[in-house]
């Protein structure tokens, strides 16, 4: 894998976005928020703009976490296929881009915390250099007093806590305050997602995450589809749609040689994490199908290229599912 084909860092994403804006103005529209750190968070919306937006199937897909770079590259590779007909490494795409762009309107937030990503010491996590304890300390930082992993909370302040190292997962939102992007309504992720949802009509939301799958023991599993936090409380039709979407992803991962958890996972965080998720995403989950993808990170079983392929496949499965749904 050549690093120039791996646009994980903000300056690489920004350069590709500028090039695609120039080359594909009829397919790509870009809206951005500026983070406190001055990094730009992009929402990239693709469709065949000549036929407008009404009647099209809408998807919004985002990467919340800075320590999960293969998901960002997965989005950029999928966009490359749609816009250029080629993958980032210039190999030929077999997606029917014309059909997708004529029937769908797709918004991607490939990196919701570029300020965090810019602080990441690695462009990918392949399990060769860092064990997962070291990796955790990069993600969430190091506590000054205990020297162990810093706490995981929706929001914290330098006025109350001074970590020995600030985790890359956190987004700085003011002089003193940091948030975890998918758990706090003040994050660029939630703000830009809500802005886009006010502008376009989406039929489905997909968040792309990565995790180490330590809990599986042998790490045989390297991808899974998570049902929404509110799944058990949703109307039956929406529960079924979430299951169908998740199963579609699992089937495609199997076809591509991945090792998915065989069933969609109903995973609900304990409090206060659950409430943070409901505050941030409850309104979306009550309205449209929403599934979270998890692809293995920092493990020798899943190379960075495979991480990217499995992440991108989560998007493709959602788009195909949308196009086939009534
Ligand atoms: Zn994540």
Image (tube, rainbow, N blue to C red):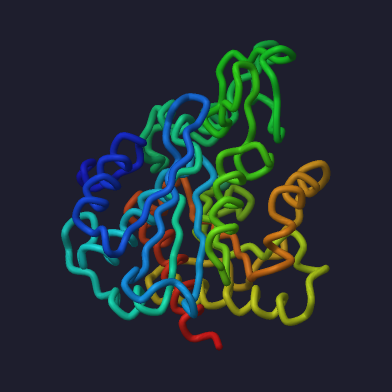
Figure quadrant of residue 85:
bottom left
Residue at point 46%, 50% (across, down): 109
Nearer the observer, 57 or 294 = 57
Location of residue 23 with respect to 95 vertically, above or below:
above
Residue at point 18%, 68% (across, down): 92
Figure quadrant of residue 7:
top left
Residue 264 shown left or right of residue 12 in the figure = right
- Position in image of residue 196 (x %, y %): 54, 55
Nearer the observer, 308 or 242 = 242
- Position in image of residue 192 (x %, y %): 55, 47
Location of residue 307 with respect to 106 vertically, above or below:
above
Quarter holding the C terminus is bottom right
- Position in image of residue 107 (x %, y %): 45, 59
- Position in image of residue 255 (x %, y %): 40, 76
Residue at point 62%, 65% (across, down): 290
> What is the tally of numbered marks visible in this picture?
0
Residue 234 shown left or right of residue 27 in the figure = right
Residue at point 60%, 22% (across, down): 174
Location of residue 325 with respect to 101 vertically, above or below:
below
């Amino acid at each position: 894998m050549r690093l120039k084909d791996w646009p994980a860092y903000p300056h690489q994403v920004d350069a590709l976005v500028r090039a695609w804006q120039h080359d594909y103005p009829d397919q790509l529209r870009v809206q951005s928020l500026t983070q406190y750190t001055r990094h730009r968070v992009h929402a990239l919306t693709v469709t065949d703009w000549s036929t407008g937006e009404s009647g099209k199937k809408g998807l919004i897909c985002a990467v919340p976490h800075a320590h999960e770079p293969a998901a960002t590259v997965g989005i950029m590779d999928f966009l490359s296929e749609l816009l250029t007909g080629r993958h980032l490494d210039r190999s030929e795409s077999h997606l029917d881009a014309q059909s997708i762009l004529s029937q769908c309107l797709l918004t991607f937030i490939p990196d919701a915390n570029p300020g965090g990503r810019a602080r990441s010491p690695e462009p990918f996590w392949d399990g060769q250099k860092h064990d997962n304890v070291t990796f955790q300390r990069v993600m969430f930082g190091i506590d000054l007093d205990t020297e162990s992993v810093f706490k995981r909370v929706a929001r914290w302040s330098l006025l109350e806590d001074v970590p020995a190292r600030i985790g890359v997962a956190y987004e700085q939102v003011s002089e003193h305050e940091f948030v975890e992007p998918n758990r706090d309504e003040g994050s660029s992720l939630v703000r830009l997602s809500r802005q886009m949802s006010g502008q376009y009509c989406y039929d489905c939301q997909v968040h792309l995450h990565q995790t180490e799958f330590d809990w599986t023991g042998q790490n045989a599993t390297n991808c899974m589809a998570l049902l929404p936090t509110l799944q058990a409380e949703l109307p039956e039709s929406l529960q079924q749609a979430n299951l169908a979407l998740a199963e579609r992803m699992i089937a495609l991962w199997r076809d591509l040689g991945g090792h998915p958890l065989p069933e969609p996972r109903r995973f609900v965080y304990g409090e206060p994490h659950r409430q943070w998720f409901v505050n941030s995403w409850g309104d979306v989950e009550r309205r449209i199908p929403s599934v979270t993808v998890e692809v293995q990170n920092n493990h020798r079983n899943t190379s960075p290229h495979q991480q990217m392929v499995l992440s991108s496949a989560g998007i493709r499965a959602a788009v195909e599912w949308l196009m086939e749904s009534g």
